Each structure stands twice: as structure tokens, then as C-alpha cells.
Image: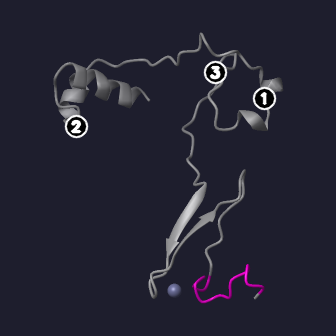
Amino acid sequence: MEHAARNLLTQQRGEDHTDAAKVADTPAVQTVLGGRTLRAVSIRDMSAHHVNTLIRVPGIVVNASRSTPKAQEVCIRCTNCGDLKVLPVAPGFGTFTMPRTCMAMRPSEEMGG
Ligand SMILES: [Zn+2]
């Protein structure tokens, strides 16, 4: 997020934000999410309905790491027939299993096959 803020600041200075040297000349910035309108949610009150929403949690950060993105859907295309399928990935720690055969060749489940 800080990198995006530096890009924006470089852009506002009228310089090329895609030029890494220009971005490096821009002073480091700290971003603060506008938390005044967000009601604080204690860790004990966090639940599944907070997933994919921006929340504010009071506390002290003792460790931080980069989050790892996880696909919600996977789009696959058959190299033989070009059949395109969008398949959901299981939520949480669930993974995606790549089909071993072309899904166009399989009898459709709706047709009772
Ligand atoms: Zn195919």
C-alpha cells in the first residue's frame, strides 16, 4: 500500500510514476486507513461475516507479514478443444483440484449422466 501511495505522490508531482528512479526520489510515506468512520471490532468479536471487509481492530502490532492472495475462482481452458470453465476454489484453507480430463467430454451432471 505504501508503494501505491508513493506512486500516487510521484504522479501528483507531475513526474512519471512508472519511472523507478523518480519514485525512489519521492519521500517514503506512511498510509493510515481512514478508521474514524469504522467501528472498532475486538478480536474476540471477529467472525466469518467480517471476511472480505475492512475492519479496525484495536491493539498493538507485535509482528507483521505479507498476506498471501488466494484465488476464489480458477479459469481453465482445455488445450485440445478450447473449452473454458470457471471453477470455484473451496473457501478457507480449501484447495483447488485440477480436473484430469476435459470437462467438455464429461456427460453433464444436469443431464443426469
Ligand atoms: Zn477439451
Mark closest to the chain's N terminus, 3 or 2: 2
Question: Most extreme residue toward the top, as rendered?
Answer: 36
Residue 89, image quadrant: bottom right
Q: Residue at x 61, y 54 (%)?
A: 72
Residue 13, given in percent of the width and then of the height, sits at 20, 19
Q: Are marks 3 and 1 in contact (CB under 8 Å)?
A: no
Query: The N terminus lies in which quarter of the figure?
Result: top left
Residue, disc 1 = 46
Q: How is the image coloured?
A: one colour
Check disc 2 and report its element: helix, strand or loop. loop
Residue 11 position, x and y percent, is: 23, 25
Q: Main secondary structure of the magenta part?
A: loop
Residue 55 horizontal side relative to residue 34, left or right = right
Residues at circles 3 and 2 in contact by the CB criterion of under 8 Å = no
Element on which disc 1 rests: loop
For discs 3 and 1, the disc positioned in front in the rendered view: 1
Q: Is residue 89 magenta-colored?
A: no
Please report whichever mark, 3 or 1, sits nearer to the chain's N-terminal start. Answer: 1
Q: Provide residue 113's location: percent of width, then percent of height.
A: 75, 88
Which numbered circle lies on residue 18?
2
Query: Label 1 neighbourhood size at 10 Å, few (<14), some (14-19), many (20+)?
Result: few
CA gap between label 3 and label 1 equals: 17 Å
| Distance from Cα at disc 3 to Cα at disc 2 | 32 Å
Graded by Cα atoms within 10 Å as few (under 14), some (14 to 19) or many (20 or more), the crowding at tag 2 reads few
Type of amino acid at the residue the image marks with label 2: Thr
| Residue identified by numbered label 3 | 61
From the viewer's perspective, is the residue at label 3 or at label 2 nearer?
2
Query: Magenta stretch?
Result: 100-112
